[in-house]
Amino acid sequence: MIGIVDYGVGNLFSLRSSLDFLGLKSQVTGDPQVLRAADRIILPGVGAFGDAMEQLRRTGLVPLLEEESQKKPLLGICLGMQLLMEESCEYGIHKGLGFIPGRVASLEADLPDKALKIPHIGWNALHIVKDDPLLKDVREGEYMYYVHSFYATGCLESTLAVSDYGLPVTGAVRKGLVWGVQFHPEKSGEAGLRLLRAFGQLKGGI
Amino acid sequence: MITKRIIPCLDVKDGRVVKGTNFEGLRDLADPVEMARYYNAAGADELVFYDITASAQGRTIFTEILTRVAKEVFIPLTVGGGIRSLEDFDRVLKCGADKVSVNSGAIRNPGLIRQAAEKYGDQCVVLSCDVKRVDGQFILFAKGGRENTGIDALDWMVQGVQNGAGELVINSIDTDGVGGGFDLELLDLAASRVKAPIVASGGAGKQEDFAELFSHPGMDAGLAAGIFHTKKLEINTLKQYLRKNGVEVRL
């Protein structure tokens, strides 16, 4: 069973539907017992970093996530991936979970081509820079669906894949049993479903 | 780099897709769920559903359909039609919509865009504008293009984006249904005034129209209904043509 961390952020309809569609059992929960019993954990999220981190802290689940992320696969999606980093500069400096070294910065500030629109929204090709079991069924250059204005940077060592938006946008990261994707696999058609299926096949201790 | 998007639009009334559909090989020729499946397989980048029913019963059927689509089609879904309040946003987002398109509802209540953007984020709010030339000026129309609001359409778009609309759908009433190409004069003007993504609508009649659209800077997506529903143009064929002509698309 996949435990989807419920901390009151975001619309989980599509994520749950896509896991159902793949035959992967999931439960949206803030219950520590259920998250401990889960085989793997997904940390979803949309919205602003500071608010989301604050809400996540309020649930009291942060120490549990620290502990469980050492034992079983954890996947952060979109803002959920950004929360895995050490800090973000979205509307002030906010501390993140720090599971993956790196920080979250503003795309708008860093884009060399100011004609590019913000948010980075739409389908972008994913370029795989490091082979990984999460991406085993994703082909080089397949398109994923992104919606975001901030991005993870300074995480080169953990980076699995990037997309080009005037600069290399971190698309997927991994450190140990913690994975993160900036795009929305639950909205990325067949390619996204294959990635979620691969997540469902990851085992603890890989 | 980010791709140009091709978006079919489905007008749904009493649970059926209306407007000249000619879908051979499908069990039900106007079942929105079947059509969503078909378009997903054909390579649509996004789907837009317009609820054109007025009755409460029709509305319930619409949200049931949306839920069924969202349970098996995993690409972005935009929903419009009859969106007048935050409750309407809530209703369709809970059923699996990713973006909500407002049109007349924003004209009646301009505060709606800001409220919705603050609650759900800019990326969730699409401002759809029906525009027509009146005495050489681009004017905003309401109620499915039947009512002249007297509002300058370009000013309206600028204001909408300032208020938090994350995307604009610009439908030209003058070119709609003619099949002679998109209204590039209107679209260019819009692109020069706003930085939000622009979805062009109205006038697509052949694949060259899309190639021409995307040769103009600031155009992010092309939306059409009839040309896709009648299979006069298949999305996959269109995308291959576009790629051959140097337009980056998802294939």
Image (tube, grey):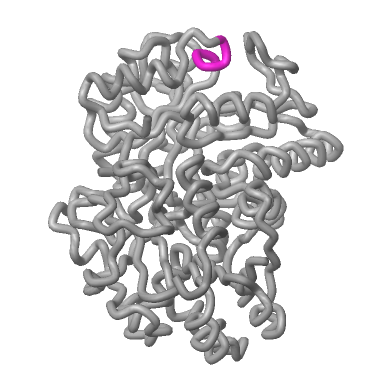
Q: Is residue A128 left or right of residue A205?
A: left
Q: Nearer the viewer, residue A112 or B58?
A: A112
Query: Was residue B174 drawn as part of the magenta stretch in this picture?
Result: no
Most extreme residue toward the front is A205
Residue lying at 65% horizontally and 40% vertically, measured from the top left: B72
The x, y position of residue B50, in whole percent, is 63, 33
Q: Is residue B34 left or right of residue B242?
A: right
The x, y position of residue B128, in whole percent, is 50, 38
A205 versus B123 height, above or below? below
Q: Is residue A103 left or right of residue B98?
A: left
Q: Nearer the viewer, residue A120 or B68?
A: B68
The part of the chain drawn in magenta is B226-230
Instruction: Please name the predominant secondary structure of the magenta segment in the image.
Output: helix
Residue lying at 24% horizontally and 51% vertically, measured from the top left: A165
The x, y position of residue A66, in whole percent, is 49, 87
Q: Is there any visible trace of residue A117 in the rendered image?
A: yes
A147 versus B7 height, above or below? below
Q: Is residue B147 left or right of residue A100?
A: right
Q: Nearer the viewer, residue A168 or A122?
A: A168
Residue lying at 43% horizontally and 76% vertically, measured from the top left: A83
Q: Is there any visible trace of residue B89 in the rendered image?
A: no
Q: Quadrant of the N terminus of chain A?
A: bottom right
Residue lying at 29% horizontally and 80% vertically, measured from the top left: A101
Give the mark count: 0
The x, y position of residue A164, in whole percent, is 23, 50
B210 versus B90 height, above or below? above
Q: Quadrant of the C terminus of chain A?
A: bottom left
